[in-house]
Image (cartoon, rainbow, N blue to C red):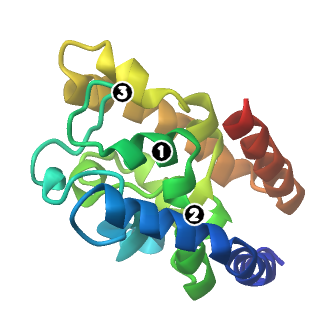
Amino acid sequence: MKRFFDILFSILGLLLLSPMFLVVAVWIKLDSRGPVFYRQVRVGRHNRDFRIFKFRSMRVGSDKGSLVTIGGRDPRITRSGYFIRKFKIDELPQLINVLVGDMSFVGPRPEVRKYVDMYTPEQLHVLDVRPGITDEASIAYRNENELLATADDPERFYIETVMPDKLRINLQYVENYSFWGDIRLIFKTFVAVLH
């Protein structure tokens, strides 16, 4: 039922959002040099790598340094990038990942290999399910970039404080998953983004 929902609504989403995708694509191209999409290797179900689709919100080559982004003072983020990140528009191309089966609408957010390699054996159970566009941890940490901006060492703070708490929340999801819980979480995400 979950996979059927993912296929049906990712197709509908891509069709309905295609005019907005076009506007965002033009804005990104006019705002800075580089491709419209950013494709980064993330870790998915069963610890397999896949390439995630996102609208590019940072300058080309910005991912060569720190993988952690920090609030309004991060100079790597483009002008259009600040806006599309604030309203989570940069995440919408992941509907493509949902359609092809790399991701689901709801599930633990996919992490980069560098951080997954730090997981404990227990934490690796978040990879028992497909990663998602949204999860409870994303809502709890919707202002994560601003939180990291206040830390003396943002990456260390992420690794030692934020990441373990997000994994704790996501492990609860893996243990207590339900289809109707996913539907509730999708609506909760819309409210959080618009708030």
Mark 3 — residue?
71
For disc 2, the neighbor class at 10 Å (few under 14, some 14 to 19, many from 20) is some
- Quadrant housing residue 42: bottom left
Image coordinates for residue 49, horizontal then vertical, percent: 33, 74
> What numbered label is drawn on residue 36?
none
For disc 3, the neighbor class at 10 Å (few under 14, some 14 to 19, many from 20) is some
Query: Does the residue at mark 2 contact the one at mark 1 (Cβ under 8 Å)?
Result: no
Q: How far apart are marks 2 and 1 (CA)?
A: 11 Å
For disc 1, the neighbor class at 10 Å (few under 14, some 14 to 19, many from 20) is some
Amino acid residing under circle 1: Arg
Mark 2 — residue?
92
Image coordinates for residue 89, horizontal then vertical, percent: 56, 54
Amino acid residing under circle 2: Leu
The answer to whether any part of residue 130 appears in the image is: no
For image coordinates 13% across by 58% down, the residue present is 61
* Nearer-N-terminus badge (3/2): 3
Q: Is mark 1 on a helix, strand or loop?
A: helix
The image shows residue 29, relative to residue 142, as above or below, that is: below
Name, please, the residue furthest toward the right: 180
The answer to whether any part of residue 141 appears in the image is: yes
Amino acid residing under circle 3: Gly
| Residue 175 vs residue 139, the one in the foreground | 139
Q: Distance between the residues labelled 3 and 1?
A: 10 Å
Mark 1 — residue?
85
The image shows residue 192, relative to residue 111, as above or below, that is: above
| Residue 13 vs residue 132, the one in the foreground | 13
For image coordinates 22% across by 30% down, the residue present is 155
In this picture, residue 151 sits left or right of residue 107? left
* Nearer-N-terminus badge (3/1): 3
Image coordinates for residue 92, horizontal then vertical, percent: 57, 63
For image coordinates 79% across by 56% down, the residue present is 182
Q: How far apart are marks 3 and 2 (CA)?
A: 20 Å
